[in-house]
Amino acid sequence: MILKRIQLGMIHVAVAMTLVPINSTLNRVMIKELAISAALVAVLASLPYLFSPIQVAIGSFSDRHPIFGYRRSPYIVLGLALCVFGLVLSPQAAFQMDQNLALGALLGGLAFGAWGMGFNLATVSYLALATEISGEGGRGRTIAVMWFMMIASIVITAIGLSQMIDPYTPQALVRAFWVVGLAAGVIGLLGLARLEKPSKDLHAGEENYSWGVLSRFILENRQATMFFFYLVILLAALMGQDILLEPFGGEAFGLTVQQTTRITSIWGGCVLAALLAAGVMETRLAKRTVAWIGGWGALIGFVLIALSGSLLSTSIFYSGVVLLGLGTGLSTVSNLSLMLDMTTAGKVGLFIGAWGMANAISRLLGSVIGGAVRDLVARLSGDAVVSYVVVFGLMAGILLISLALLRSIDVGAFQKQANESPSIIERAAMAGDAG
């Protein structure tokens, strides 16, 4: 089972590797070097999350339509191929936008759209495969291994990218993206080799739930509703900085592309350390307490990053990045644990779908709002650095709202209501019979 977990982790690593160049290095180049609107960059970067609702359809379709007996592997291969294609095409789209905005935006939509479609296709398929292979008792350990390998790969990829684009040239950037894309493809295929056994029953499949059933089930449980909005607000703040942190380093401190790419490795290293620390903390502290500590750590990190722009201090900036990484890591582990606790009422698939939708909505809102506010404030103030300071201050405020909501989350109350209430699936069936 250890080997299978490592193989699943390799697939997770492969998809994450294709994300790093697009979500960190390319964003900085587009916003700082090419002076492309941050709002436009945010919209392109958010395409994967616009496509996220298709994960439900993809999962259901793969349940019912195995290819040569394999329910997950072909869809993982197709998804990974689309990720690699989108990755290697994205620099060309960025440079084209600098010359012809309309044509470049169209090409960018193709590149980011292909990556987004591939991300959703691969993600739902390998998570389903991980669930099936691990069994109920081993899912926690499998998730831990996959997540640890993914964060480590982000750090290593960021460090490798910073070396490959030193000194920065458009040709070096294109070459680096090709290297990362091909490496991701090879790692993903090696991880997939002989991992899934062909299914003998080609017609069995999971029951299909509509988004209407999903939303009613969540909204009828007050604690589930609170947790859903808590996740949206929290992750909108934590992930809203994705496309802005590196451009800010370039604008405020004159950091090179190589230096700002290293910001991702610093942040990822701190997340990795916090993931390990959170495992120890959760044996002594309540999960909600760890989430509280993580949220406040990230909030203070945002305040320091905003303050560094006002004072033009790189030491304060890097202190903020460290705290943001540590806070994100603690928050990730504790909220993942809370999420699993909030999916114990016999409808795991429904709730995982809801939390996945919360993640997608939050990333979309965080990226678009962050990019739009940055552009608006920069236009009104005439100072790009001030616009970033406002955005990071806004993210700190959003985190404060999420921490207020966290005080109202009660897993025990959720489980009591979910277990005592009639199943929404049963009620939907009865309503159908009555009609």
Image: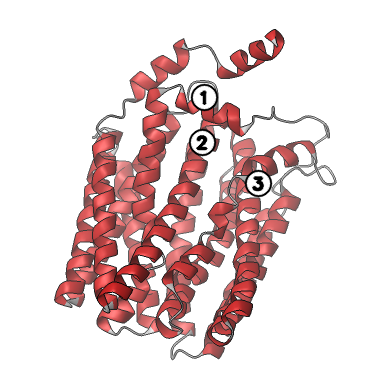
- Point 47% across, 54% down: residue: 364
Disc 2 marks which residue? 354
Disc 1 marks which residue? 217
Q: Earlier in the sequence, mark 3 or mark 1?
A: 3
Mark 2 near mark 3, Cβ–Cβ under 8 Å?
no
User: Which amino acid lies under the numbered mark 2 shown in the image of this protein?
Assistant: Ala
- Point 23% across, 64% down: residue: 320
Q: Quadrant of residue 59?
A: top right
Mark 2 near mark 1, Cβ–Cβ under 8 Å?
yes
Percent of width and height locating residue 197: 75, 42
Q: Earlier in the sequence, mark 2 or mark 3?
A: 3
User: Which amino acid lies under the numbered mark 3 shown in the image of this protein?
Assistant: Ser
Gap between marks 3 and 1, in whole Å? 24 Å
Estimate how packed mark 1 is, as few (under 14), some (14 to 19) or many (20 or more) residues with alpha carbons within 10 Å.
many
Q: In this rendering, which labeled residue sits more in front, label 3 or label 1?
A: 1
Most extreme residue toward the top is 434
* Badge 3 element: helix
